[in-house]
């Protein structure tokens, strides 16, 4: 199957849609223009359309035949708070907001799949096209579920994809079990007392305590976690002080933890709290800890991972099981906790990426590869036609 030729008549309009969304990016739970464009496109196909789900989410439903099985296909809609530096003709018109993760492409692919399935109807059952807000750290999937997503739109299984710049165009990977990590965020406020830098003996030193803390936090994974497990703890921000001769009264230490095993997740949080308490006791400081587990691990069910891989092959992609998961996170995890399903990485790496190489996700010059549009459409269509056979 040649995906580009199979959907050739759809592609010009889908490229226009994708680039329009790129030029008008919207942050999580503020995707009002994006959601309106999607709802309009789905209504033009005669689909049943529901809006405002979980904030700005859209679900369009296509039914055909008498089959009772149903499938959910999900695309994320939100952009990132990044200043775009691509210089492209369709670059962001909203300073400080950028589709730097390719959600504009995911949305266009799902619209394209809906258009093709609405005209061919080569399936028997129900397809729910789920356009989700706020994937980038705000838990839009969880919001949609709490707003009754799967009660209102029952799905026997759910599937989603993400473009993957490190994989060549024409390839795809998935895997049974964990494919993306759980994501935790911690903020530790180290309280000293503040005072003159010439008299450190008179005040607990919050900066020195924070320094000890960072060193010990970075030893948790290497010394407290089984080496056969995988986890990452990274300190990403240290903030405190404003003058060369003043010991500040507080320092803020921020970071992230990524893991795949809930027991490992528990162990890391417990050790982080113990380490902070120990450093506070030894330095005469006080530490307030805010630890947030905002995304669980994205865990594919085994049968659906095989279905996703086989659908990629049916779509003409070179498909395989990924040998290892990624430490990035994804809130499709909430949907996979509620329903069987699978998540797939769709290669978009260009054969000739240019002098600076293929731009990674979240890069200020990143742009979705429009040549991947028909490949994503083909995968969505293969899932529906394979699982809801007419």
Image: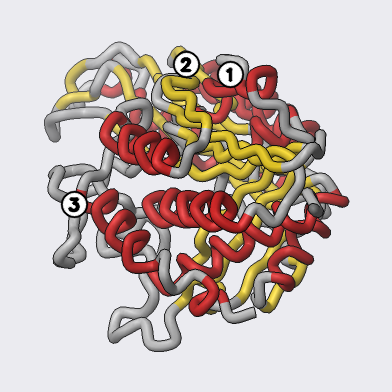
User: Which coloring applies here?
Assistant: secondary structure
**Looking at the image, which is closer to me, 35 or 48?**
48
Q: Is residue 2 left or right of residue 268?
A: left
Cα–Cα gap, marks 2 and 1: 7 Å
At 57% from the left and 36% from the top, the residue drawn is 331
Q: Is residue 54 above or below residue 232?
A: above
Mark 3 burial class by Cα count in 10 Å: few <14, some 14-19, many 20+: many
- State how far apart marks 3 and 1 are (Cα): 45 Å
Q: Earlier in the sequence, mark 3 or mark 1?
A: 3
Q: Quadrant of the N terminus?
A: bottom right
> What whole-number distance in Å separates the C-alpha atoms at marks 3 and 2?
41 Å
Q: Quadrant of residue 189?
A: top left
Among the two numbered marks 3 and 2 on one chain, the one whose residue lies closer to the N terminus? 3
Q: Secondary structure at mark 1?
A: helix
Q: Which image quarter: residue 272?
A: top right
Instruction: Identify the residue position indicated by label 1 in the image.
Output: 277
- Name the residue that disc number 2 marks: 287
Q: Is residue 151 visible?
A: yes
Any part of residue 224 in sight: no
Looking at the rendered image, the disc whose residue lies closer to the viewer, 3 or 2, is 3
Instruction: Say the numbered circle drawn on residue 159.
Output: none
Do callouts 2 and 1 mark residues in contact (Cβ within 8 Å)?
yes
Q: Which residue is mark 3?
A: 92
User: Of 278 and 107, which appears nearest the observer?
Assistant: 107
The percent coordinates of residue 168 (x first, y second) are 54, 78
């Amino acid at each position: 199957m040649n995906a580009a030729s199979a959907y050739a008549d759809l592609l010009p309009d889908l490229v226009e849609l994708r680039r329009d969304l790129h030029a008008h990016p919207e942050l999580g739970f503020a995707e009002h223009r994006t959601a309106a464009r999607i709802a309009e496109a789905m209504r033009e196909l005669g689909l049943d359309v529901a809006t405002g789900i979980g904030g700005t989410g859209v679900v369009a439903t296509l039914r055909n035949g008498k089959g009772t099985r149903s499938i959910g296909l999900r695309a994320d809609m939100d952009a990132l708070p990044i200043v775009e530096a691509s210089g492209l003709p369709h670059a962001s018109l909203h300073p400080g907001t950028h589709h730097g993760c390719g959600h504009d492409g995911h949305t266009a692919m799902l619209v394209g799949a809906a258009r093709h399935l609405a005209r061919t109807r080569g399936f028997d059952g129900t397809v729910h096209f789920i356009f989700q807000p706020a994937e980038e750290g705000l838990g839009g999937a969880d919001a949609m579920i709490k707003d009754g997503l799967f009660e209102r739109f029952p799905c026997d299984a759910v599937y989603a994809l993400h473009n993957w710049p490190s994989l060549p165009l024409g390839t795809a990977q998935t895997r049974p079990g964990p494919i993306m990590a759980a994501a935790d965020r911690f903020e530790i406020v180290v309280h000293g007392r503040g005072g003159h830098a010439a008299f450190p003996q008179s005040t607990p030193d919050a900066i020195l305590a924070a320094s000890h803390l960072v060193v010990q936090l970075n030893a948790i994974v290497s010394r407290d976690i089984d080496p056969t497990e995988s986890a990452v703890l990274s300190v990403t921000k240290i903030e405190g002080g404003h003058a060369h001769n003043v010991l500040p009264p507080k320092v803020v230490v921020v970071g992230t933890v990524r893991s795949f095993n809930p027991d490992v997740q528990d162990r890391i949080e417990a050790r982080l709290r113990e380490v902070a308490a120990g450093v506070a006791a030894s330095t005469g400081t006080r530490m307030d800890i805010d630890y947030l587990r905002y995304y669980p691990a994205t865990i594919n069910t085994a049968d659906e991972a095989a279905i996703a891989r086989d659908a990629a092959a049916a779509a003409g992609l070179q498909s395989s099981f990924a040998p290892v998961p990624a430490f990035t996170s994804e809130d499709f995890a909430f949907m996979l906790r509620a329903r069987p399903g699978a998540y797939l990485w769709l290669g978009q790496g260009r054969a000739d990426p240019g002098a600076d190489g293929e731009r990674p996700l979240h890069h200020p010059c990143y742009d979705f590869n429009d040549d991947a549009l028909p490949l994503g459409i083909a995968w969505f269509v293969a899932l529906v036609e394979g699982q809801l056979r007419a």
